[in-house]
Image (cartoon, grey):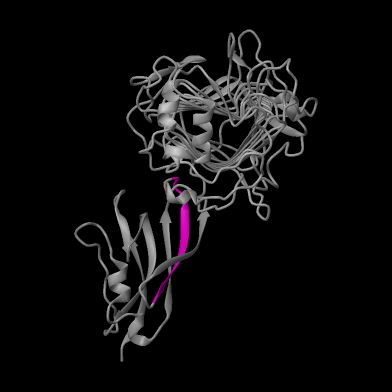
Amino acid sequence: MKKIVLFTALLAILTGNAWAFTGYQAPMVNGIGLFIIYDNSVTGETTNLDNDGVINMANTLLNGEGPGAYGWNFVYIPFIYKNGSGQDVIALFTVDSNRNLGQLQSVTVPLPSTYPPAACTDGGVLNGKQICTLSGNISNSVRLTSDKYWELRGKLTVASGVVLEVEAGTTVFGNKFDGTLRDYLVVDRGGKIKAIGTKNAPIVFTGRQALEGTDTVSSGQWGGVIMAGYAPTNQGGEAQFEADPDIYYGGNSPADNSGTLKYVIIRNGGAEIAPNEEINGLTLCGVGSGTSIDYVEIYNNLDDGIEFFGGTVNVKHAVLIGNEDDNLDTDQGYNGKIQYAYIRQTYISSKDPRGIEADNQHANNDAQPRSNPMVANLTIDNNVPADASIQPHEAIMLRRGTDYHIMNAVVTGNPRPDNCIEVRNDSTWTAISNTSDTVPTFAGVALGNVCENGYFGVKDNTTYTDTDLANLFNGTGSYSAISFNNFTNSLTTTPVNPATYDSFFDAATFIGAYAQENDWRQGWAVGLND
């Protein structure tokens, strides 16, 4: 009588190896799996790694002694592994009698902190909670606890090799700068931030006035968050950040890891950190794809919401509301993916705020690597007044040689000149109209009733026209292979599956940032009804 033996094996696998399950592969490190082994013996058999460092569970589970021999339809396989952020992931798989593997669900479990609480330099009491002040360099890994407020005094730098952990529910704040102090946070190359909030207890970076409740709306109350990494840019090696030349970024490590931001709100920032140098809510300089950014909001910032200076970092679930310059700004060779982005412009600004402003490089439009972002499930509410006295507020501006891909998007707002999509520079046209590209420039995009003067605005060009751009958007003529399923004067269109084009994307086949039955913004983001 054949016996079924269950056993647990602890396997240490070098990074880069994978578990192979009948064609399924997932990178797993330090995994603990509960394997179901079919055997003639009482003691069972040991399953070891093969010569390639891979265990083939399909052979173990699905050979002639497997479930098919007993007429079983499926088995369950729980597996525990660590993801790239150092968190435990518990995944449950099924294997049916046809040797098909399917993942039922997975749960990510944050690991307990291993870092000591940061020392508290007393800064008084606010709202009944002790204030601890922070300044200078963080040279040892520490944790900011949620039972205190943490006040930035000047520039706070997380040094290389150091982790700054921020507990869920923690508030960090800064002040308007004076002649000597400019309050902002910098994560240097090689340093990491581990800011993992929850839906019910997000982490908040804000200004003192907003925290006090005396002014919860105004921007410019403090600086912002800057992260620097070793991922590539098109600046010719390492570069210096324009607003703070002491910050260096860029390198040759696309998968560089600067840490984790999850359920993080950055609000009321954008103050100058140098003369005429306001900063973004979140600045990502050469940040790599090993970094995890998920559920992040930038609210009422004086400059851009998020700006990407090169790098390869990906973002999911971004809320950008009331920022006085651009909301998503990409340049210097940024090659990353963004999914689920909600943008709403509420300020009438003397600047030129846009939903998306995309560049490659100003000095050399064709610098390599070329900026080539991919954005899926995007909503832009560009509801600015039709007032000729203010500058245009384009929903999307593509220029200076960038390539770009937008899928499953909806743009709403008042119809007015330039309140739509604008393309500048021949180099940009060449990039976005490349018929050999395997990813569509626009797919599943609805432009509502925002395009007063045709589909697009054209500037600074000699080789393309509004008609060319309209054909690209409509997928007509020679561009039909790369652009399709797009509509103007409509809030609906036929969505595509973005996972077809890159494995980072979820297979979210709806247009806009969220599905009506699953609005992920609710319960944590602020300003949704402003």
Corner quadrant of residue 240: top left
Between 144 and 402, the one lying in front of the other is 402
Between 68 and 210, the one lying in front of the other is 68
Locate the N terminus by quadrant: bottom left
Q: Main secondary structure of the magenta part?
A: strand
Query: Farthest residue in the bottom direction?
Result: 1
Query: Quick check: is 92 in the magenta stretch?
Result: yes
Q: How many marks do you count on the picture? A: 0
Residue pictured at 74% horizontal, 28% vertical: 210
Vertical arrangement, residue 316 with respect to residue 425, above or below: below
Residue pictured at 74% horizontal, 30% vertical: 211
What range of the chain is rendered magenta?
85-96
Between 418 and 178, the one lying in front of the other is 418
Residue 280, position as x, y percentages in the image: 58, 24
* Left-right relation of 240 to 265: left
Residue 316, position as x, y percentages in the image: 54, 43
For the question of whether residue 143 can be seen, the reply is yes
For the question of whether residue 189 can be seen, the reply is no
